[in-house]
Image (cartoon, rainbow, N blue to C red):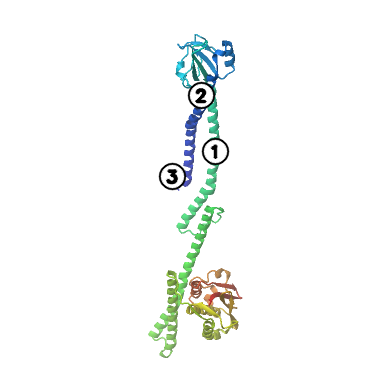
Amino acid sequence: MKIKKSIYYKFLLGYILFALISILYINTYINYKTRKDLLNIHYDDIVDFANKFKIDSYTTSDLDNIFLSSKYDLIIVDKDNSIKYSSLTGSSENTEINIDAKDYTKKPSVSEGNVIQDIKEQSIVYSVELTYGKYRGYAVFLEGMSDINYEITNIVVLDFNIFCFMLLASFAILIIFHLSVYKPLKKISVASKEYAKGNLKYKGLSKFKNEDEIGNLGVSLNYMAKKLDTMEEDQKNFLSNVSHDFRSPLTSIKGYAEAIKDGTIPYEMQDKYLDIILFETNRLTKLTQNILSLNSWDSTSMRLELSTFPLHTMVTPIVDSLENKCLKRKVHIRVESPTDTYMVNADKEKMEQVLYNLLDNAIKFSHSDSTIILKVYSKNDKIFISVKDSGIGISKDSLDKIWDRFYKTDASRGKDKTGSGLGLSITKEIINAHGENINVISTENVGTEFIFSMKKA
C-alpha cells in the first residue's frame, strides 16, 4: 500500500495540518483579537475615569493619596508640555515627558515607548485639556501595559490549553478511526486482493466482528467469496456431470455402430442393438432439449399457456403412463384425493412435466414392494400435491443442491442410470414461473416427500 494513497495517512496529514493551522490561528488572530478587545475595554474605562475626575477639587497631597491606590497615574503638564504634577514614583518637575499631551485628547491609545524618563513601560494614554481652575494645560491619565499584557497572556494561554485538550480529544478520535475504520478497511482490502487472485479460501475475514456498516461489508465480502468458491466447485461438478451424461450414450452408440459395421454383431441380432442405439439417441436428444429449454428460460421468462382444467385430468393419465415402470420396480402408486372436482389454473403441459418428474424420481429411488403416495388436498386458495415415497432418501448435505442443474447424489448415481440430473431443476423453474412454491422433506433410508402448490381456479 503506497503511503500517499493511503486513507489513513491522508487522515493523519489532515490532522497535523489542522493542528498547525490552529496553533497559527491562536498565535495570530486570537492574540490580536484578545488584545484589541481588552484595550477597548481599558480605553473606555480610562476615558470614563478621566472625564469624571475633577482635578481642581484636590490638593497635591490628595492627588498623591488617590493615585497611590489607583491603577491609573496622573501627569499634569502646561501648554509647553512641561510637567507640573506627576503621581509616578521617581518623577519630578524636571523630568521630561516623551509624548505630546494634546495628541491624546481625542481618544486614548498606547504610547510608542515610555511616557517619561526612567519609567521603562508602555502605557495607555488619555489627555484632558484644562482650561480653568488652578491648572492650565493637560491632565494626562496613564495605565501601565504590564498588567494588561499579563491579562492578555493569561487569556491566550487559556485558549491554547483548551485547544491542546481538544487536540488530545481529537487524537482519541484518530485512534478510534484507526481501530474501527482503517484496520477493518485494510483487512477488507487485503482480502479483496486475495479473492481477485483467485484465492477464494482466504480466511482473513472469517473472524470479522465489527457490527457496523464496515463490518457488514466484510461479512458480505466473506460470504460472497464462500459462494464463489462453492460455485466454482459446482461448476466443476456441472462439467463433470454433463461430460458423463453425454459420454455414456455416445460410447454405447459408437461401440454398437462399429460392431454392426464390422460384422461383430450377427445380422439376426442387429435389430436389438439398433434399438439400443435409438434409445441412447433419444436420451441425448432429450438431454439436449432440456439444456436448451433451461437456457432459454434464463434469458427470457418462461412463456406459460395458462388454462383452467380439472386436476384429475392431469393426474390420472400420468399415473397410468407410469404403470409399466411401477410393475418392473414392483412399486405401487396410491392416489389420495377427497374429490375429483378440483379445478386449477396453470400451464397444463408444463405442470404435467412437474408431476411426471416427481413420480418418476420416486419410482427410481423406492424400494421394491413399496408404495408411493400421491396426495391432493385444498387449503385456502391453493391446491397442494404431495409425492411421498419410502425409498433411500436424500442426505442433508444434498438437500440444498438437488435443484442445481446436473446435480446427482451419490445414491442416485448408483440407481439412476438414465437420468440427466435436470429433472428437478426443470421442475423448480416451472413452479417458480407459476409463482408457486415447492418444498422437500427427506430422511436418509426413510423416504422423501415433495410438496408443490397450484392456484385454485
Residue 80 percent across, percent down from the top left? 45, 11
Q: CA distance from mark 3 to mark 1?
A: 27 Å
Q: In this picture, is 222 found above or below 60?
A: below
Q: Residue furthest front?
A: 132
Tell me where residue 226 appears, x and y as whole percent: 51, 61
Task: Check disc 2 and report the residue beneath it.
Answer: 43
Q: Which mark is residue 4?
A: 3
Q: Farthest residue to the bottom: give it.
A: 268
Snapshot quadrant of residue 331 = bottom right
Asked if marks 3 and 2 touch (Cβ < 8 Å), the reply is no
Q: Nearer the viewer, residue 254 or 140?
A: 140
Query: Looking at the picture, which amino acid does disc 1 mark?
Result: Met
**Whole-percent x, y for residue 1 in the image:** 45, 48
Q: Disc 1 designates what residue?
A: 166
Helix, strand or loop status at disc 3: helix
Question: Which residue reaches farthest top?
Answer: 94
How far apart are labels 3 and 2 at the CA level?
53 Å
User: From this viewpoint, is residue 414 visible?
Assistant: yes
